[in-house]
Amino acid sequence: MAHESTYTPSTGIGRWIDTRLPVPRLMHDQFGVFPMPRNVNYLWTFGAILSFMLVVQIVTGIVLAMHYQPTVDGAFDSVEKIMRDVNWGWLLRYAHAVGASMFFFAAFIHTFRGLYYGSYKAPREILWMLGVLILFLMIATAFMGYSLVWGQMSFWAVTVITNLFSSLDSLIPGLGTTLVQWIWGGFSVGEPTLNRLFALHYLFPFVIVGVVILHIWALHIPGSNNPTGLDVKTKSDTLPFHPYFTIKDGFAIVLFCLLFGVFLFYAPNYLGHSDNYIPANPLQTPPHIVPEWYFLPFYAILRAIPDKLFGVIGLMGAIVVLFFIPWLDTSRIRSVSYRPIFKWFFWLFVICCLVLGYLGSQAPDGWYLFWGRVCTIYYFAFFLIIMPVVGLIERPKRLPGSITESVLGKKTAAPSGGAA
Amino acid sequence: MRNILKLFAAIAVLAIAFPGAALAADDGHGTEIEAQDWSFAPPFGHFDRAQLQRGYKVYQFVCANCHGMKLLSYRNLGEPGGPQFSEAAVEALASQAQITDGPDDMGKMFQRPGKPSDRLRSPYPNDQASRAANGGALPPDLSVMAKAREGGPDYLYALMTGYGEVPEDMKMTKGMHYNTAFPGHQIAMPNPLSEGVVEYTDGTEPTIKNYAKDVSAFMVWAAEPKLEERYKIGARIMIFLIVFAVIMYLSNIAVWSRVHKKDHAAKTET
């Protein structure tokens, strides 16, 4: 796209296709010879891992949908029936359920990698925003998928989360209630709710595929960032995508599958909650309603804020704020490796997110609530105060002259590239 | 590169270590759940057929008086990876149950002996009947019970062996029974097991502990009938992935060595 095409079809058919729908040229230019900064480390393989996981989720999900029954009376039993009576059903269902966790695990690493190396800065703002949009769609999709199991946690998670909209009643009386009933398709979470959740859960992954294509498109305009955050200057800074990064990504995907396999085959329910094997019962609230682990930090933020409406705003804001960080970060340089002050704040932010995750799994009282509030404040302060201020006052370390120099030495302060 | 491999290794180790830790953990209600040795522990475990058969017997003579297991069919009892009763035994077990079928040609429901394709007979026709017969409490279906409680079989074992004298400082609600494992220590279910209540024919001591252990194992199988297949397929896939990972690692080195050679040449030039 931004580069001269080097594709020359060698056969008559190849030339015929090339003048009509040049898909082979696209593949050659974007995934064959596409120049990648040669120093990207293994954190850059998570893009490929995520693409792989998206395919895993869609393929297993489509087959599951062939056997699933989106009815209040049949949903829970149909999931169990899939695992008992459908050929390889247990594998499909557990792969899909564990796969969601793996997907989020990879997405979080991918996001933090972008955050650390400043991959959101010019000229990659739209690329980053599309990524945040994908994260948002993933959250919605995973939430709806979890509800389909129709266990106790499914049911009560839907009840709690949809009820959040009723907080709008404090703005315009009646607005929230009307909205919630519209979402439910009735006066409580029931069959119409389950049916629309199923329909949308099937739709959203394909929306994600669309945004992923835009995400990759936006990536291929400036090309990948790299651990130094420097722009590519000469041809020696890059290597062709194939074979260097196809093989590296492939290796990383296999390693990731090993981790996936450990959970899938030996602890498929470890990441879930045992209460979700109790069929949904609208008359009995579980003692603790907790979401899946990947939502726990957001859940902690929601519960840290005493007011319901502001809690919801905080919950949404935790994602929305990510859209703005290309402009909130005032630093001239990208990679946190060269930012001696911001580095500390960054790692504190990582710890803050992990602590929020832990607090989200605990009852919100006493010290748990106190630390939940401290971490919530830091979460937003990190983006809204620390990012703009530190960028202005900080004096970055000396950057290497080029990507090639960072790899080949002169003993500059290059982070261990790993790859090269 | 090496750091990243270490990271992956650390994550894998943590991933394996944590489920074990979780099983041993306290459930937060002030109850202690002791971890037991189970033959089906990952990654290479398998069910003890004789134990599952004994467990079914305990289920049939004790639990099934109040609890259903509606996700299982009698045929499952003969399938690989389970108690593996013989075909004749499955038919005999099924035929002991009276199943309501119909409607017949006259539009009437009728009773007939069970067939292997029937679901395990539930003791009550509906939840209301179940509550009416149990003082308002609803004995839950046990099909996935082993997955529906934190601690799984350890919890079930602790629950069934956890009945005892009410401590003096504890006030019990009427009709409730003291149990050390149950959250809140008050459970509606009376102590289901007593020594010798079920006859064992394979020489196993007919103790409460053995009953509890056998029926807990049976309930794990009932909740996870494909557990053995999962471990077996899992081992094959994991071995394949490890070999594949080694091949990919070596290929990666081979491909990147071209770059490293060039780099080396460039370095020596300068």
Image (cartoon, coloured by chain):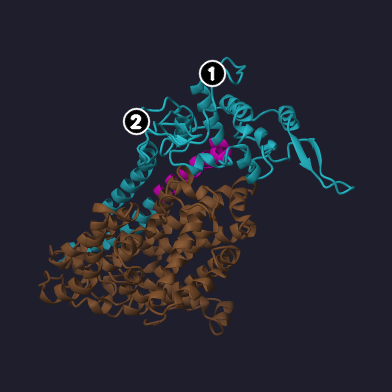
Chain colours: A brown, B cyan
Magenta region, mostly helix, strand or loop? helix
Query: Callout 2: 10 Å neighbours few (<14), some, many (20+)?
Result: few
Point out the frontmost of discs 1 and 2: 2
Front residue of A181/B175: it is B175
Considering the image in quadrants, where does the N terminus of chain A appear? Answer: bottom left
Residue at mark 2: chain: B
Q: Which residue is mark 2?
A: B169
Q: Where is residue A69? Give x, y as percent.
A: 63, 58
Q: Where is residue B83? Give x, y as percent.
A: 61, 30
Q: Where is residue A350? Give x, y as percent.
A: 25, 60
Amino acid at circle 1: Glu
Considering the image in quadrants, where does the C terminus of chain A appear? Answer: bottom left
Q: Which residue is mark 1?
A: B195
Q: Residue at x 46, y 67 (%)?
A: A162
Q: What separation in Å lies between label 1 and label 2 (alpha carbons)?
A: 29 Å
Indicate whether residue B196 is drawn in magenta: no
Query: Callout 1: 10 Å neighbours few (<14), some, many (20+)?
Result: few
Q: Is residue A358 positioned above or below A181 on the image?
A: above
Disc 2 secondary structure class: loop
**Magenta segment boundaries in residue numbering:** B220-248
